[in-house]
Image (cartoon, rainbow, N blue to C red):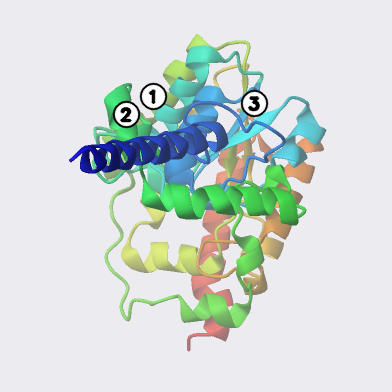
């Protein structure tokens, strides 16, 4: 009987020790940055934005932030730091709405005085429902909320223990990992005309053009969220970037009847945000040399990191910048280019 009791005691002690080791490993290595920045020489290996962005935003030391959807993932943080100064981290939400990026920005501003905000402003995000809840049930809420009891889903997570921790340690020890490439996916993709065209399901007919101002209420609601932060943070420099979507995207806008709305949303954004001295806007969408060269793209919208680097270089030179004096002219150029795309460029592939 005594042997049985001792066996049971030892069994539970061993279980307790094992659980304690799991907790200690997760808390120390912390691959999702839930508790702290990487310790002990470990690198910030960032590959899962939905799990890692919120931790880095709350716990890293930085004075600048790069916000955007998947088109912003291939920026190297250091490009911005070398061009404009500061220390940047990246806050990415794939297919991001304005509300989602504003959530991350507000989280950053709780504990950080930001010198620079680099915001990749997607047209689609201006037309998204601004009342959606974020984070929602599709996200790992245990990493977002303040309920410590929920941390059990992290410290006893088998994927974290047996996949994420070993991966973070292996990349740190075995690879020359550049922390500035957080969430970068370009190295795994092929950019080519053929690849881009394969992803484009072109409508067989052209739909009626939607009235430009039908989207105004939604666009203004999204812009109000950005405008409020711009006003509240006058010492922060906000640089908004309109990324260069491929001509396939613009052709799709035309055929879906959304071209006028998208151009109108851009005008409203420029008109609203340029009213503030701490805002700069950079507009790359009407660069014919980029958007009509499909070898820059893997699909209708996602371009190579070569273009990301070019964008930062040109921003540093002050090129492609919209002002209150020229934004109407530059957007008119995009409208003219869109007409060229659907009436000339696209005919090379669709006759």
Please state which of the two labelled residues, at mark 1 or mark 2, is closer to the viewer.
Answer: 1
In the structure shown, which secondary structural element does the residue marked by tag 2 occupy? helix
The single residue placed furthest to the left in the displayed view is 1
Residue 130 visible to an observer of this rendering? yes
**Local crowd at mark 3 within 10 Å, few (<14), some, or many (≥20)?**
many
Say if residue 318 shows up in the picture. Answer: no
Residue at 42%, 33% in the rendered image: 20
Sequence-wise, the earlier of marks 2 and 3 is: 3
Report crowding for label 2: few under 14, some 14 to 19, many 20 or more residues within 10 A (C-alpha).
some
Where the N terminus falls, by quadrant? top left
Label disc, if present, on residue 64 of the rendered structure: 3
In this image, 173 relative to 100: left or right? right
The circle on residue 225 is 1
Residue sitting at x 47%, y 54%: 162
Which residue is the site of mark 2?
221
Horizontal side, residue 252 vs residue 184: left or right: left
Q: Secondary structure at mark 1?
A: helix
Tell me the distance, in whole angstroms, between the alpha carbons under discs 2 and 3: 25 Å
Give the alpha-carbon distance from disc 1 to disc 3, as whole Å: 19 Å
Give the SS element for disc 3.
strand
């Amino acid at each position: 009987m005594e042997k049985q009791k001792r066996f049971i005691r030892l069994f539970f002690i061993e279980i307790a020790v094992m659980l304690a080791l799991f907790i200690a490993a997760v808390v120390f290595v912390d691959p999702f940055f839930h508790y702290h920045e990487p310790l002990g020489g470990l690198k910030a290996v960032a590959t899962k934005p939905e799990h890692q962005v919120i931790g880095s935003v709350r716990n890293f030391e930085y004075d600048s932030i790069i916000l955007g959807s998947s088109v912003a993932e291939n920026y190297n943080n250091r490009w911005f730091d070398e061009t404009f100064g500061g220390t940047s981290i990246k806050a990415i939400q794939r297919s991001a709405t304005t509300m989602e990026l504003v959530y991350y920005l507000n989280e950053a501003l709780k504990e950080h005085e930001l010198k620079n905000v680099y915001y990749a402003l997607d047209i689609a995000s201006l037309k998204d429902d601004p009342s959606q809840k974020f984070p929602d049930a599709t996200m790992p809420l245990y990493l977002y909320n303040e309920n410590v009891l929920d941390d059990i889903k992290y410290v006893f997570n088998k994927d974290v223990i047996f996949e994420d921790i070993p991966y973070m340690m292996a990349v740190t020890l075995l690879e020359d990992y550049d922390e500035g490439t957080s969430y970068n996916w370009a190295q795994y993709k092929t950019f080519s005309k053929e690849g881009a065209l394969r992803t484009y399901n072109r409508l067989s007919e052209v739909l009626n053009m939607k009235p430009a101002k039908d989207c105004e209420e939604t666009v203004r609601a999204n812009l109000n969220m950005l405008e409020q932060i711009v006003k509240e943070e006058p010492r922060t420099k906000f640089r908004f970037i309109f990324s260069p979507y491929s001509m396939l995207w613009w052709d799709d806008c035309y055929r879906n009847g959304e071209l006028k709305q998208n151009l109108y949303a851009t005008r409203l954004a420029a008109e609203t945000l340029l009213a503030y001295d701490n805002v700069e806007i950079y507009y790359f969408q009407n660069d014919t040399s980029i958007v009509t060269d499909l070898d820059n793209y893997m699909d209708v919208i996602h371009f190579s990191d070569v273009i990301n680097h070019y964008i930062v270089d040109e921003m540093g030179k002050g090129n492609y910048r919209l002002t209150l004096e020229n934004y109407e002219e530059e957007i008119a150029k995009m409208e003219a280019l869109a007409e060229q795309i659907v009436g000339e460029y696209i005919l090379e592939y669709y006759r």
